[in-house]
Image: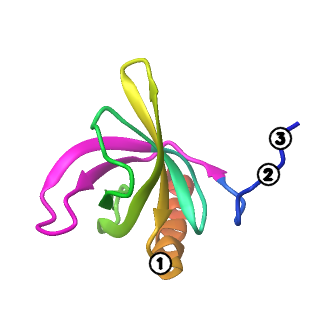
Amino acid sequence: MRKERRRAPRTFSNLPLDLCDPKNQAVIGEGRFINVSLTGSLLESRQPLRLQQPIRLLVQTPGKSPFQFAGRVVWKKKKSSVFNYGIQFESVAASLGYARQSMAYKEVA
């Protein structure tokens, strides 16, 4: 059994999101969370990203305003036609906002 190295527990998710350039906030691709925590997430996307690349993620939940937060790519793994990325969030405040919106989404769904 592997030792858990994460600093915060993860919750499974399947929310779609847009990947945005952090400077001009233009959408550069689409993806979805596989799991998410207060400090980071596992992201799946067809969009190739570089290690240490800053990224802005835009999550849109039904009936709510879009929520945007920042992070960076800390690891990546190619899986058939998609990439899995480890995203480290830039701030805990941003991920707390996402967690609240994620819970609101689960209540609606």
**18 magenta-colored:** yes
Horizontal and vertical percent for residue 8? 70, 65
Q: Is residue 102 left or right of residue 30?
A: right
Residue at left 16%, top 52%? 27
Residue at left 47%, top 67%? 89
Disc 1: which residue: 91
Disc 2 secondary structure class: loop
Disc 3: which residue: 2
Horizontal and vertical percent for residue 5? 74, 55
Q: Residues within 10 Å of mark 1 (few under 14, many from 20)?
A: some
Mark 2 and mark 3 in contact? Answer it, CB < 8 Å.
Answer: yes
The CA span between labels 2 and 3 is 6 Å
Residue segment shown in magenta: 11-32
Amino acid marked by disc 1:
Ser
User: Residue 68 appears in which quarter of the rendering?
Assistant: bottom left
**27 magenta-colored:** yes
- The extreme right residue here reads 1
Q: Residues within 10 Å of mark 3 (few under 14, many from 20)?
A: few
The CA span between labels 2 and 1 is 22 Å
Mark 1 and mark 3 in contact? Answer it, CB < 8 Å.
Answer: no
Disc 2: which residue: 4
Q: Nearer the viewer, mark 1 or mark 3?
A: 3
Amino acid marked by disc 3:
Arg
Mark number, residue 79: none
Disc 1 secondary structure class: loop
